[in-house]
Image (tube, rainbow, N blue to C red):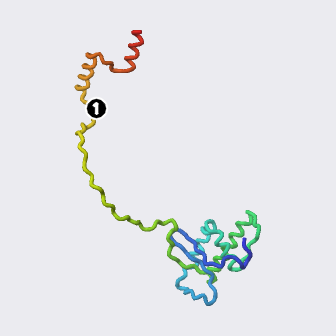
């Protein structure tokens, strides 16, 4: 952890769902209007979520409010430390030492810029080529025509199948 009093003084931006909040430490003469603040109960209710998703920011707030974090807390002491941090931040929200403002959510860094449309190119004139008409392909040809073709091949002595022809030639040899 950081040395007390030297840590990040804020403001901290934390997000919960579609909402984004900016938490600031309220000092005398800060010029913040109390009407802008999000109710302390609403923010205190979300501290549990932030303790798991934004723990570092909550610890920085705790230190900025004067809390001292141990340098080497064990995993058994961590639960007690987290409880102490949540309670102190909830008290600071109720007392007005810490205030939350609802802010407009920033655009993500990965957002694409608006689409840039290139100027249209002049298209060259294309003359269609003369092609012979193509017969439509049918999956199952006319069975009568297929039978006639097989009869003509048998009469001419043309083999129907390469495998059958090879067997015939082996048997003749």
The image quadrant that residue 83 belongs to is bottom right
* Front-most of residues 28 and 137: 137
Mark 1 sits on what residue? 140
Q: x%, y% of residue 113?
A: 45, 67
User: In the shown orientation, is residue 69 left or right of residue 17?
Assistant: right
Q: Where the N terminus falls, by quadrant?
A: bottom right
Q: Nearer the viewer, residue 109 or 98?
A: 109
The residue located at (57%, 86%) in the rendering is 32
- Check the picture and name the quadrant holding the C terminus: top left
Report helix, strand or loop for mark 1: loop
The quadrant where residue 100 appears: bottom right
**102 in relation to 171, above or below:** below
Q: Number of marks in the image?
A: 1
Viewer-side residue, 156 vs 3: 156
Q: What residue is drawn where x is 61% and y is 66%? A: 53
Rendering coords of residue 81 (x, y %): 71, 70
Residue at 53% in and 83% down: 36
Q: Residues within 10 Å of mark 1 (few under 14, many from 20)?
A: few
Question: Which of the pair 160/21 is nearer the observer?
Answer: 160
- Give the x, y percent position of residue 52: 63, 65
Farthest residue toward the bottom? Answer: 29
Please provide percent x and percent y for residue 140: 28, 32
Judge from the rendering whether residue 59 lies leftward or rightward of residue 129; answer left or right: right
89 versus 161 height, above or below: below
């Amino acid at each position: 952890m950081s040395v007390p009093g030297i840590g990040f003084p804020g403001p901290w931006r934390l997000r919960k769902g579609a909402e984004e909040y900016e938490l600031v430490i309220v000092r005398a003469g800060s010029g913040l209007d109390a009407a802008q603040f999000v109710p302390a109960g609403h923010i205190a209710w979300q501290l549990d979520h932030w303790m798991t998703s934004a723990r570092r920011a909550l610890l920085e707030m705790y230190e900025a409010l004067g809390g001292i974090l141990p340098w080497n807390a064990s995993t058994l002491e961590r639960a007690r430390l987290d409880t102490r941090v949540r309670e102190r931040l909830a008290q600071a929200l109720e007392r007005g030492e810490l205030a939350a403002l609802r802010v407009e959510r920033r655009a993500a860094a990965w957002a694409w810029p608006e689409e840039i449309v290139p100027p249209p190119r002049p298209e060259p004139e294309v003359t269609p080529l003369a092609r012979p008409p193509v017969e439509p392909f049918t999956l199952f040809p006319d069975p009568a025509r297929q039978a006639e073709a097989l009869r003509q091949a048998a009469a001419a002595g043309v083999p129907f199948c390469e495998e059958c022809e090879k067997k015939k030639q082996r048997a003749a040899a």
